[in-house]
């Protein structure tokens, strides 16, 4: 499997997870109700495009395996299951039935199919490693997909409708709590995975896999820094928009720049994670 194809799968799954899970998880309060309603059409469009991108990514993976001559009946069944889940999400939205729990469960199931095809699944005692991989990827997808949701859906709406500045501030603060929990879970499960695939400190620095892990960790720290800036600086400024309308609007414009940068770092983080799936594990240092 090529690195670009694997990155496309990771990015598509994260975008889909953000599209279906962001509003139910981070915009359930009265303080965010107006922005949630205003964003509903854009959210539906993003979900459909993300579902299409996810389906194309899975088909591309299958075609590449077909060209490599390694396709089995398991791969055929896996593709069918994946496309069924993706179609289910898209069709429920198209019919007007935006059933968030079902869409979130379907997204989690898609990520599980990826974990069942990961390096963790090849271990003799695979159940706990696969579970750790699934939890790790699910929380990462919701977090990074949420960052993309801010950049693609919410910020453009708020910059056009200034009365929603306070709603954006409340959303940032609520999402920050979800992000903190995601950071803790990702950190713990990441340590578990590293212990399985990095055999020594020397291997961490002297193998391609180990260096990819270091890059991913560094980008992870950058993402945490962005989150702290948004939570403690941008969010409070946006919440005070009625008293300081112009400064709050400027805060929203700064947020557009920083959240776009964070989205780019998220894409790089997923690229580093994708690289780790195609590189040999760092059990020994050369």
Image: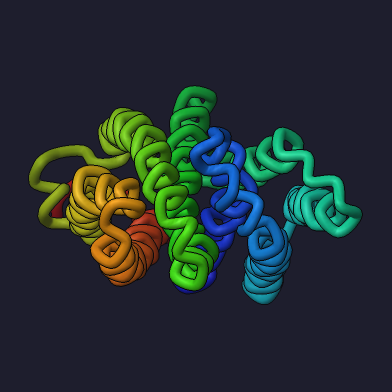
**Residue appearing at x 27%, y 32% in the figure:** 191
**Above or below: residue 138 compared with residue 10:** above
Left or right for 179, reference 76: left
Q: Quadrant of residue 45?
A: bottom right
**Above or below: residue 190 compared with residue 247:** above
Residue 129 point in image, percent of width and height? 45, 30
Residue 2 in view, yes or no: no
Left or right for 274, reference 236: right
The one of 221 and 204 positioned closer to us in this rendering = 221
Residue 131 point in image, percent of width and height? 51, 28
The one of 91 and 231 positioned closer to us in this rendering = 231
Residue 251 in view, yes or no: yes
**Residue appearing at x 51%, y 32% in the figure:** 130
**Residue appearing at x 52%, y 54% in the figure:** 14
Q: Quadrant of the C terminus?
A: bottom left
Left or right for 142, reference 43: left
**Residue appearing at x 54%, y 64% in the figure:** 153
Outermost residue toward the right in this view = 95
Residue 40 point in image, percent of width and height? 68, 56
**Above or below: residue 248 compared with residue 221:** below
The one of 146 and 78 positioned closer to us in this rendering = 146
């Amino acid at each position: 499997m090529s690195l670009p194809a694997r990155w496309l799968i990771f990015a598509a799954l994260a975008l889909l997870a953000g599209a279906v899970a962001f509003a139910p998880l981070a915009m359930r309060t009265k303080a965010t109700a107006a922005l949630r309603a205003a964003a509903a059409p854009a959210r539906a469009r993003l979900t459909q495009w993300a579902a299409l991108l996810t389906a194309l990514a899975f088909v591309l993976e299958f075609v590449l395996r077909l060209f490599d001559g390694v396709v089995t009946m398991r791969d055929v069944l896996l593709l069918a299951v994946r496309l069924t889940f993706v179609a289910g999400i898209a069709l429920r939205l198209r019919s007007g039935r935006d059933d968030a729990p079902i869409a979130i469960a379907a997204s989690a199931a898609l990520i599980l199919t990826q974990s069942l095809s990961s390096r963790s699944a090849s271990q003799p005692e695979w159940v706990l490693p696969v579970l750790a991989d699934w939890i790790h990827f699910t929380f990462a997808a919701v977090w990074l997909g949420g960052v993309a949701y801010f950049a693609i859906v919410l910020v453009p709406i708020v910059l056009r409708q200034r009365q929603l500045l306070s709603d954006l501030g409340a959303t940032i603060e609520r999402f920050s709590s979800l992000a903190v929990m995601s950071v803790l879970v990702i950190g713990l499960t990441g340590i578990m995975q590293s212990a399985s695939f990095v055999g020594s400190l020397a291997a961490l620095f002297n193998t391609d896999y180990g260096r990819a892990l270091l890059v991913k960790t560094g980008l992870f720290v950058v993402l945490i820094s962005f989150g702290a800036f948004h939570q403690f600086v941008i969010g409070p400024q946006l919440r005070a928009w009625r008293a300081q309308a112009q400064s709050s609007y400027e805060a929203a414009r700064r947020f557009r720049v920083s959240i776009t940068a964070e989205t780019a770092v998220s894409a790089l983080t997923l690229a580093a994670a994708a690289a780790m799936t195609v590189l040999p594990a760092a059990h020994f240092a050369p």
